[in-house]
Every structure is written in C-alpha cells, then in structure tokens.
Image (cartoon, rainbow, N blue to C red):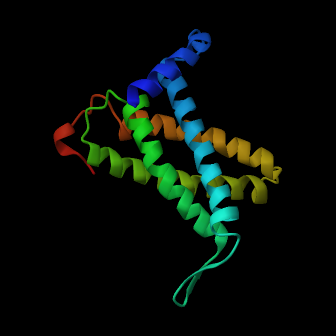
Amino acid sequence: MTRLVTSILDFFYIPFKRYIPAQTFRYLACGGGNTLLDIAAFFVSYNYILKKQVVHFGSFAVSPHIMAFVIAFVISFPTGFFLMRNVVFHDSTLHGRVQLLRYFLLVAVCVVLNYIFIKLFVEQLHIFPTVSKILTTILVVSFSYITQKKYTFQANPARESEEIF
C-alpha cells in the first residue's frame, strides 16, 4: 500500500519537481488528502449516520457536530499517522510508539492553535472569518510540517536512547 501511494504521488510530483522538494509535496498531498477524508467523514457522520440528532450516553448528551467531529477524528487520525509515517517521513529512525505519541501530541497542539488563531484574528484583529481561517491554516500547517520533520518523525535523532515520549 505504501509503495502504491508513494508511486502515485511521485508521478504527480513531476511538474512540481523544480519548485518544491519531494517530501514537501508528499506532505501537502497526504495532509490535503487526509483533510478531505476528515471533512467527508464529518459530513457523512453528521448528516447520514447521526442524522443531525443529539447522541445520548445515559444521562450524558453529545451534540451531533461534536460527535461527528469525534467520528471523523477516529478515522482521520490513524490514516494521517500512517501516511506521515510511511509515505512522507519514511526515513525516521524512531520507534513507532514514540512517533504515535508525538503525532497525537502535535495534533492536539494544532487543534489548540487553530482555536487560538481564529479567535485572535476574528475577535481581536477583526479579520473576516474566512480570511482568518486561511491565515490560520497557513500558520498551523507550516508549524505542523516543521514539527513533524524535526520532532515527530525525525530522521537522525540526537539522543535516540533518551526517547522523550
């Protein structure tokens, strides 16, 4: 599966070869594809599985959009990790469990950053919400790429024996 995905991405990379490194292209393609999967899973969950209804767990109620978010996350998180680990950052020398924990922590930080930047841009800087979302996405995706490359899936860790997580 990894070879198939990599071969397909490498084929589409040819026109971009002069402009961006292969790893960056793979990151954008895999991340973009996983984002589309996440949005599709959210849409299907919200509209067709949950039918826009509140989900009850005994006396605890979960709104349909939050439950759809959870369902989409359960689908897109492992897919994103698989793609990042095996297609984009395949040269990492860290153990899989270390990568998984670091990836989870990074995803959690990115969720918080999205919230903070959108609130900041819209409520404090009075930038239109859609423009705020675009700016936030650029900042968070850039942060995520650098963090994944240098920390989550690092190729030559300085102190591999100390595995921080």
Q: Residue at x 74, y 52 (%)?
A: 121
Name the quadrant containing residue 122.
bottom right
Percent of width and height locating residue 150: 39, 34
Residue 69 relative to residue 125: left or right? left
Quadrant location of the N terminus in the rendered image = top left
Closer-to-camera residue (102/42): 42
Q: Residue at x 47, y 23 (%)?
A: 23
Closer-to-camera residue (75/101): 75
Percent of width and height locating residue 148: 43, 38
Name the quadrant containing residue 160.
top left
Percent of width and height locating residue 35: 59, 44
Percent of width and height locating residue 3: 39, 24
Q: Residue at x 44, y 37 (%)?
A: 83
Q: Residue at x 79, y 52 (%)?
A: 129
Closer-to-camera residue (43/32): 43
Residue sitting at the far top:
18
Residue sitting at the far front:
48
Residue 7 relative to residue 60: left or right? left
Query: Where 10 falls versus 18 (above or below)?
Result: below
Name the quadrant containing residue 138.
top right
